[in-house]
Amino acid sequence: MTARIGVVTFPGTLDDRDTQRAVRVAGAEAVPLWHKDKDLKQVDAVVLPGGFSYGDYLRAGAISRFSPVMESVIEQAKAGMPVLGICNGFQVLTETHLLPGAMLRNNHLHFICREQKLRVESDRTAWTADYTAGQEISIPLKNIDGQYTADERTLDMLEAEGRVAFRYLDGNPNGSLRDIAGITNEAGNVVGLMPHPEHAVEPLVGTGRTDGLGFFTSILKKLVTA
Amino acid sequence: MTLDTVKHAAETPDVKLPWAELGLKEDEYERVREILGRRPTGAELAMYSVMWSEHCSYKSSKVHLRQFGEKVPANDAMLVGIGENAGVVDVGQGYAVTFKVESHNHPSYVEPYQGAATGVGGIVRDIIAMGARPVAVVDPLRMGDAHHPDTKRVLPGVVAGIGGYGNCLGLPNIGGELVFDACYQGNPLVNAGAIGVMRHEDIHLAKASGPGNKVILYGARTGGDGIGGASILASETFDDTKPSKRPAVQVGDPFQEKLLIECTLEAFAEKLVVGIQDLGAAGLSCATSELASNGSGGMRVELDDVPLRDSTLTPEEILMSESQERMCAVVEPGKVGRFLEICEKWDVIATVVGEVTDGDRLEIFWHGEKIVDVDPRTVAHDGPVYERPYARPQWQDALQADDANKLARPADADELREQVLKLVAAPNQAAKSWVTDQYDRFVQGNTVLAQPEDSGMIRINEETGLGVAIATDGNGRYAKLDPYKGAQLALAESYRNVAASGAKPLAVSDCLNFGSPEDPDVMWQFAEAVRGLADGCLELGTPVTGGNVSLYNQTGEAAIHPTPVVAVLGVIDDVARRTPIAFKEEGQLLYLLGETREEFGGSAWSQVVHDHLGGLPPEVDLGREKLLAEILISASRDGMIDAAHDLSDGGLVQAVAESCLRGGLGARLIVPDGLDAFTFLFSESAGRAVVAVPRSEELRFTDMCGARGLPVTRIGVVDGDAIEVQGAFTLPLSEVREAHEGTIPGLFA
Amino acid sequence: MARVVVDVMLKPEILDPQGQAVQRALPRLGFQGISDVRQGKRFELEVDGPVGDAVLARIQEMAESFLANTVIEDFVVKVEDEKAEGEK
Amino acid sequence: MARVVVDVMLKPEILDPQGQAVQRALPRLGFQGISDVRQGKRFELEVDGPVGDAVLARIQEMAESFLANTVIEDFVVKVEDEKAEGEK
Ligand SMILES: Nc1ncnc2c1ncn2[C@@H]1O[C@H](COP(=O)(O)OP(=O)(O)O)[C@@H](O)[C@H]1O
Ligand SMILES: [Mg+2]
């Protein structure tokens, strides 16, 4: 038996096919989900992939958040289903308030695409169990609205509860507060991050590293052994 | 205001039309009257004037471009050649690839962000129109002086626009160029290329056949974009009171285009489309007349059914509007329902605006009246053809006589070292990552190589590893010294880049950027460049599959350097054997392939150190290029080399510096017998590459080169953290990096 | 037909990278004496029919839940006085 | 200290993809009766000292040459009446 992992496509989603590939490379079954469809097709987990849903025209993630599929995702996420938001997906998760904080334009105001070193701060989430806390990984980063912000109280709470899941290393690429690259909810089932693990699962393409594969093997193991 | 119907036009032969304001010459207007046997209606005049413009009709360049069709090399890869939206080549395993380069020069000067953005949008629609999924873009750019204040306005805007549009579309940017030269100051060149992939059976063409089939316009609503000319027509002749406030600049909507891609591909997959055309220059005028003239019958269009963004548009304006993100499909009546359903699924507005008829006329109606009744071929294909006069410029001899080989060379090793640093830090040779880091190169998850590699490479089949590579090049300085050779050097460099990364060069697309064709000097440059490129393609066996011409790139009397930008597409059977440029293993041996001569005409060294342009460009030996490519590909196939980098502007030292920085390792170089250090480092002789060979492969590799007759010289070893030229100087890599990587951010960040 | 304007600005305590970039550029362009710049968004909504209290309340709600992200942004809703326009 | 606001909007004849995206989303979110949405930028400038005609002229110039791209955008400069604020 393998796990069924849903990958949502909004209009303007770009990394849905890559994310499906990453899910397959890890050995799970990728199930395409459509934004207009409330039906989650009985998947065991959902990934909200990167891209520019609705062109990011109002604010990144602001319009997609109201889609029918998100109604179900929000409901299921609250009930404990693992959800991973990558880049635009992370932005959608903050817009829905499944994760706290918000994303601002990068402090240098440019789109930035580069290989980015991160420290995995938490291995207690559904998506990071295959890493060890403190492990350094390197995966692509590519966005223009990637500056994570939240008020001090929220930041302190995230730190105190061990919910900062990833931190930028070797230089903060966009001004994110406390070098935060990704966070998790309290239960550890909902995780969002700006960099792109799905672009780092095969040695031949992208940066040539496979440091991102752990996200997908983590969830697969969790679901299969559950 | 009376509607200028066909009937009205026939009854009022003496009405004066603003043909001159619309850019037609008197004889061209007479020709229109002759074709129609009456005066044209305003709408007809609008159509003829845009379709017979230089941009759409190629009236100055056509007589020369014919050579690309005449000098076609025997190459069975070509599936669709010149004349369609983009050429298509067979890359094996049932896959076909389409690619093309286009210019958006002038709009990008006026409004850098939107001009460049809509340039990307336009070229991508050409690719979709062939039936392909776009998989990558490239952006060859030429800017004015790097230190000029206006360059600070134009370049950042252009880069943000290309990134803003391409990133949002989800197309990895895998290559391009950035060259600065004062000659481009008022005329920056923003060329954009795109590649698409499809199965052979999915190739689509721009033709409307099958009477009764429906013509569907889909995508963005039509607004008043880019119709300056038509507004004149509307206001001066037909309605003086109307304000002609029409935007000269188009704003792109990449999100809309992304939806357009997805819904078009879905319609293709369900085999719903008989013919398809994108709407670019000349908008509906172009789409309807081209679709109709390439098909079997005629076409009838109801202009009232075109969804508008601005309800005050006149029919002339609707026909000429260049609103972005629109496509036109021909669909059998029984499949229209499904086609519209797919558009709705993607929230794309789609409207049946006409149908294919069994006649041979293109008839367009407005408020029930016929306002266009033409033979579509006369609009789309029978435009004027000019034999513009051309002659070798009087200054050409003096320019060539001003020999760069006689320029003062570095007096000692210290000066040599200094000039090396100066060269790698010069804006044209400096690292371009400040630009390329603003482009997504990872999206779609198939990028094997991207900047700063020799070519961009994309995997197209995950199972077999089949991939394609693309490189674009064009050295305007060489072309200025000798446009025939300059064009061939552009071709050779692009070809060499593709081969250096391990792919087999297959076909060519080009974007020919020149000054005014009305200047015989420029026309000569153009004629020479086309002849050079056509001859070169014939010899290399790589056909020209399509391209674009951009003329009038000049301010007053001053034309840009002739700038033929050549894109070469290659195929690689398994991307696992691609050859990167990075020197990554200490102890690997460095070999120089090809011959080094004293060739400094048009070189980067002559520009950077002496601000000089004169003499002759490097010699071209396409036979040698072919051999070099074969060796590079064999070496990649048999695992004999771990890195390869082609030599071009800046010469050997530039290439070695780039490979060292990319891999994070230094190199110890020995000046070969018979060469002085200066020539060794800076000469720009063509047909060369540097490779890194694992020690275990040394014999096998040199034997292969020897057996095939390619000169091969051992020049050093990968080692340490400095670039050391024995007996001359040592440059710590950190110093090279600072010089090379600091320049562009220093100027533009 | 009436026009309602919704102005959305980052909250004062949130760093505004765009406004800062503008402010930093001003002295270079020769503009002195501007001590702070904030950049926000302006939405112009064309409303069918009259803008009564109920309509305004709806727009307020729309601004709160959609046009602004109240985690980081404040907003102001105004019915535009058509005559006050046109300074430019 | 005074506040000057510069509103920058795309010219009416220019396509506004952002405004369109918002408008198209509204019915899905249950908001009816909005026939058009345009999205632009709002700059709030804090000016040191009083805003006399000379200062306003400078800001006008700044808006024209820098804050707005007059090829595609129009702008309006307003001195803000502090008291009219604070509806929210
Ligand atoms: N420099 C060139 N070299 C080869 N083919 C060219 C060149 N310029 C134009 N063409 C070809 O002429 C045809 C018409 O070009 P164009 O009108 O630019 O096409 P489109 O409108 O689809 O962009 C195309 O097939 C194009 O590839
Ligand atoms: Mg076309």
Image (cartoon, coloured by chain):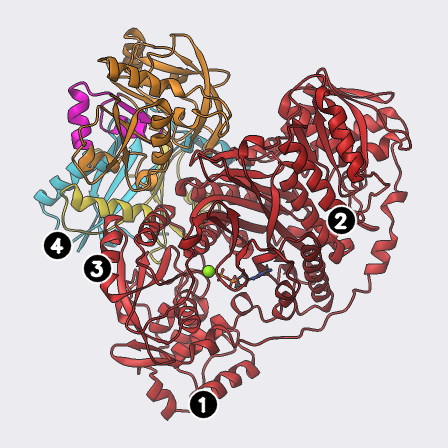
Chain colours: A orange, B red, C cyan, D yellow
- The verdict on a common chain for dots 1 and 3 is yes
Q: Residue at x 40, y 63 (%)?
A: B246
Q: Earlier in the sequence, mark 2 or mark 3?
A: 3
Q: Amino acid at mark 4?
A: Gly
In space, the residues marked 4 and 2 are separated at their CA atoms by 76 Å
Residue indicated by mark 4: C49
Q: CA distance from mark 4 to mark 3?
A: 35 Å
- Residue at 28 percent of width and 72 percent of height: B212
> Residue flagged by tag 2: what amino acid is it?
Gly
Q: Chain of mark 4?
A: C
Q: Are marks 4 and 1 in contact (CB under 8 Å)?
A: no
Compared to residue B338, the image places residue B140 above or below, namely above
Q: Residues within 10 Å of mark 1 (few under 14, many from 20)?
A: few
| Residue count near mark 4 (Cα–Cα under 10 Å), binned few <14, some 14–19, many ≥20 | few
Q: Are marks 2 and 1 on the same chain?
A: yes
Q: Position of residue B703 (x, y in %)?
A: 78, 31
Q: Nearer the viewer, residue B387 or B369?
A: B387
**In this orientation, does residue B749 appear?**
no
Q: Are marks 2 and 3 on the same chain?
A: yes
Disc number at residue B623? Answer: 2
Query: What is the x, y in percent for residue C12?
Result: 32, 26
Residue B278: % across, % down: 41, 59
Image mark for residue B337? 3
Q: Are marks 4 and 3 in contact (CB under 8 Å)?
A: no
The residue that disc 1 covers is B37
The chain holding disc 2 is: B
Distance of label 4 from label 1 (alpha carbons): 53 Å
Question: Callout 3: helix, strand or loop?
Answer: helix
Q: Which residues are magenta?
A: A70-99
> Where is B632 relative to B340, above or below?
above
Q: Earlier in the sequence, mark 1 or mark 3?
A: 1
Looking at the image, which is closer to me, D66 or C46? C46
